[in-house]
Amino acid sequence: MKFNPRNRHILLSDVPKMHDSDVPTILLPEEYTAQLNPFGVYKVEQYSGDCTKLSVDDVGKLVLVNESMVEKVNVDQGEFLLILENHIYGVLNAT
């Protein structure tokens, strides 16, 4: 189902995280989640028309956000990752 954000919200999608193969493996219970880095990188899927900080050029780009500000919405129609536009630190550009 397609979701069109409103009220300065931005629809995000997860980006596969790169793992360092040199890091030792520690076995933990499946339900345990350790968050060492409070920041995350997400892909911009769609943005509300009243957003002033993003443009159509930013759709599909990666953004840096605080993980605690990302809202995971689970409803019968699907799961959506949303954030307010002022909680985005910046857009990552390949140089």
Image (cartoon, helix red, strand yellow):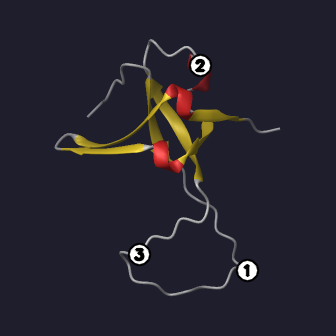
How packed mark 3 is, by other alpha carbons closer than 10 Å (few <14, some 14-19, many 20 or more), is few
For the question of whether residue 61 can be seen, the reply is no
Which residue is found at the position 60% from the left and 25% from the top? 58
Identify the element where label 3 is drawn: loop
Q: Are marks 1 and 3 in contact (CB under 8 Å)?
A: no
Which mark sits nearer the N-terminus, 2 or 3? 3
* Quadrant housing the C terminus: top right
Identify the element where label 2 is drawn: loop
Q: Mark 3 points at which residue?
A: 32
**Quick check: 52 above or below 5?**
above
Identify the element where label 1 is drawn: loop
- Kind of residue at disc 3: Tyr
- Kind of residue at disc 1: Asp
Position of 93 with respect to 7 (left or right) is: right
Mark 2 or mark 1, whichever is nearer to me: 2
- Kind of residue at disc 2: Lys
Q: Mark 1 points at which residue?
A: 22
Which residue is found at the position 64% from the left and 68% from the top? 19
Q: Name the residue under label 2.
A: 53
Cα distance in 3D space between marks 2 and 1: 38 Å
69 or 9: nearer the viewer: 69
Query: Residue 9's image quarter?
Result: top left
